[in-house]
Amino acid sequence: MADTFAGHASVTINAPRAKVWDAFVTPETIMQYMPVTSVVSEWKEGSPIVWTSEFQGKRFEVRGTILRFQPGRLLEYDHSLPIFRPSGVAQAREDRRVTIELEDLDAQTHVAVTEQGNKNKREFEHSEGSWRMVLNGMKALLEGTRV
């Protein structure tokens, strides 16, 4: 059965695939284009991944597990919603799956993201909008066009 509310976003970045991949797995770089204050993972299949953020004086965490990891090509992980919950609040089971795929296009890299597990149109729209923002932020950072 198809995932009716799977969110999709993609972008082509004027940078080699190795540089784009590094931007997905290097915490210092991730923090420049995602609204997080830390990212912790061993970046291998089966390892946890934890994103931390602060908003209005409250700390929030998103926890997941890396399901597939093919350096330079594919990163797939699961995580739970709501994306931002106060630290210490019970973690729901992981019910979202994100797949990030990188493909060479000459000197450019095409990035495609799919997020499965959205339960309704609102979650679907949030997923697609968030990933478009993240990918555009990464593109601007890597191409040196950030304002």
Image (cartoon, rainbow, N blue to C red):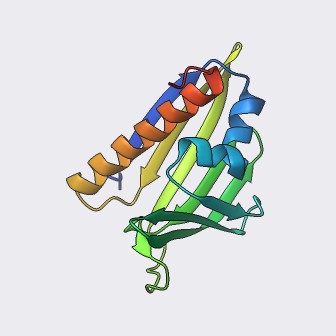
* Most distant residue in the left direction: 121
Observer able to see residue 117: yes
Where is residue 132, by image quadrant? Answer: top left
Where is residue 46, by image quadrant? Answer: bottom right
* Most distant residue in the front direction: 57
Locate residue 57 relative to residue 142 in the image: left or right: left
Q: Residue at x 44, y 51 (%)?
A: 115
Q: How many marks?
A: 0
Q: Residue at x 64, y 27 (%)?
A: 142
Locate residue 118 relative to residue 76 in the image: left or right: left
Observer able to see residue 5: no
Q: Return the x and y of residue 107 as percentages of the image width and height.
A: 71, 14
Q: Residue at x 72, y 63 (%)?
A: 41
Q: Return the x and y of residue 90 as percentages of the image width and height.
A: 44, 86
Q: Return the x and y of residue 99 as percentages of the image width and height.
A: 55, 49
Q: Nearer the viewer, residue 62 or 113?
A: 62
Q: Residue at x 65, y 60 (%)?
A: 39
In the image, residue 125 sits, relative to residue 57, either above or below, namely: above
* Most distant residue in the top direction: 106
Q: Quadrant of the N terminus?
A: bottom left
In the image, residue 42 sits, relative to residue 134, either above or below, namely: below
Q: Return the x and y of residue 14 as percentages of the image width and height.
A: 63, 17
Where is residue 16, by image quadrant? Answer: top right
Locate residue 23 relative to residue 97 in the image: left or right: right
Q: Nearer the viewer, residue 7 or 130?
A: 130
